[in-house]
Every structure is written in C-alpha cells, then in structure tokens.
Amino acid sequence: MEQRGHPESDPEFRPLGSIDFEPATCPVCGFDEVGRQLRKKFQDIDLCFGVCVRCGTLYANPRMTTDSLHTVYDSEEFFEGRENNLNYYSFLSGERYLRRTARGRIDRFRDKAPGRNLLEVASAAGFFLAEAKESGFDAEGVEISKPMAKYASDRWGVPVRAGSIEDVELEDESFDVIASWGVMTILRNPAAVMAKFHAALRPGGVWAFNTYDCRSLWGRLFGSRWYILVPNTSQIHNDRTLRRLIDEAGFDLVARRRDRPYASVERLLFVLLSHVSHGVRDKFFERVHFLNRLIIPVRAPDTFEYVCIKR
C-alpha cells in the first residue's frame, strides 16, 4: 500500500463512541412530508432517507445527532476505516490525487478572487490548504475533526480551527475566497451557513464548492444503494433548489460544471463497489491496494462544481 503521509505524525484519532440518531425534517424548507423513501443498512447501521415533497431535497430522517457527528469525525473508522469504514477506506493514502484535484480547482477560481485571504471549510488533512498556500494564498481552515485539524495545522503550517462551520464564528468581510469541498451534504442548516459565508466574504469574494445532485444519473440509477447515502449525510440537494438558495444568500452563480477530480483506480473501484455489499467489496480490496498508485482524471456522474461571487 502507498505510504500515508508522515507515519510519525499520523492523526491521533479517538475511539469511536456510540452513534445515535434523532428525528429530522427537511433541512432546507422544514417540511416533514416525503414522497419517496430510501432505506439501507450500512455497517449494521439502519439508515432512512426521504425526498421532500415541497423542495425535492433528499434528506436523512432520522439523522445523526450532533454529538455523534463529532465522535464519528474524530474516529479512525471515518477517515482510515479500512474494512470497518464509516466513509473512507483510507483518506490519507489519497494525498497525490487529492492535491492534484486541488490544483485544478484553484486554477479555476484564482482569477476571480479579489484578494489572497482564503478559508477552506472541512479541510480534513489539509491537502487543499497545502496547494492553496503554494499558490500564494494566505490560507486557513476549519475542520470538524479535532485529530485532523491538528494534523493539517502541524504538517502544513497553516491555522486550522477545530469545530463545525455551523458553530465557528467568522469575522465579517475577512476572506476573499471560501472553499467548501464535500460540505453541502453534511450541514444541518444550509441556508444559515450560506449566509455566514456571504457575511465573511469581502465584496466580490468567491465561494467555490462541489456537491451531489439527488436527481443525477447515479442518484436515480442506484437509489438506496447510492454510495453517498452514509450515516453522516444530512441532505443532498437538487440543482434547482440549490440555485435558489445561492441566489437568496446573495451570490451570483458564475460557473457550474460537472466535477472532474483526479482519483486512483483503487478509489474508483471503492466507489463503484460501494453499490454492492460491503463483504464483497472488502474481500476485493484486500488484494488491490497497489492500484492506489494509478491516478486518472474522472468525469463525475453525480457531482458538480460551483463558483459563486458575492453580490
């Protein structure tokens, strides 16, 4: 298997605590009636998602409690879970393709940024922050996982605050860019976070992010077997509702494209095999770690990248 970062400074993960769930309504519009339900079992955890009849958002009900979210994100099972993963087989072993993806994303918004102060939300191991720093940005991060926040800050020499973006205070008009990759599906109150981003950006500031579309090909094709339906997912937007939220938050959408990250062949197979049983997938992955060295560009069938400008 490929070397994971710096072994002597791997994140100091915490033991996984109990995972509890609570009743929820649609986090976008607050409605509680669904037209379609999707049920699945993930690592012996029963999950239920429904499509809101009012705004079309796919959301979890029940959803993970806030305390459980913190214990999950602090655990090895989330980022480096291997066969017992709650999301990633191994996040740290993806450094090469995640940094290459980051470089492309930075190139696409660099010329739109009015200045060089950048915040990444959900910075994880800090691979995007490292690339932003090398590209000349004054970068900092917010990361809900305390072990990952410390790891990223120590390794890359950038400030990373540990905490949920829904709780962390951001100073008004203090950033030129806010990047939030993989964040929209885990928010409890998306509209409130968008308002926070808008207030924290300077006039003309850039908000760049990516997210899934619940009406995408894979969302329709795989249903309850869709790989993004995991315990920490709160909601998955559809493009029409998301565009409305972006506009109401005071942003102009200036670019939308199908997400085109880089990934290892191992990562692609992991995603594809997430649509079958974990037992089948995990037996396969015991034999194919060498495929993590093979990196290719991917045209994501269910994920889109957005670039927005503060009005």
Image (cartoon, rainbow, N blue to C red):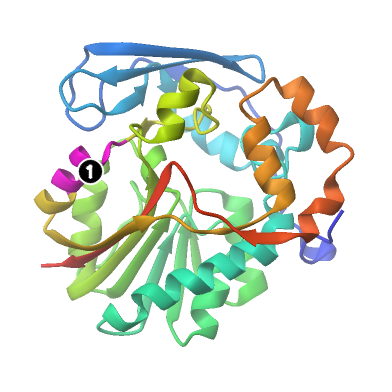
User: Front-most of 111 and 63?
Assistant: 111
| Image quadrant where residue 113 sits | bottom left
Query: Which residue corresponds to mark 1?
Result: 242
* Magenta highlight on residue 241: yes
Which residue is found at the position 35% from the left and 39% from the top?
A: 213
Q: Is residue 42 magenta?
A: no
Residue 75, visible in the rendered structure = no
Q: Which residues are magenta?
A: 237-245
Residue 118 in view here: yes
- The amino acid type of the residue labelled 1 equals Leu
Query: What residue lies at 43% left-to-right and 82% top-to-bottom?
Result: 138
Residue 40, by quadrant, is: top right
Image coords of residue 289 (percent x, y): 84, 48
Q: Which residue appears at 72% of the width and 23% of the height?
A: 278
Question: Is disc 1 placed on a helix, strand or loop?
Answer: helix
Q: Which sits in the foreground, 55 or 199?
A: 55
**Majority secondary structure of magenta residues:** helix
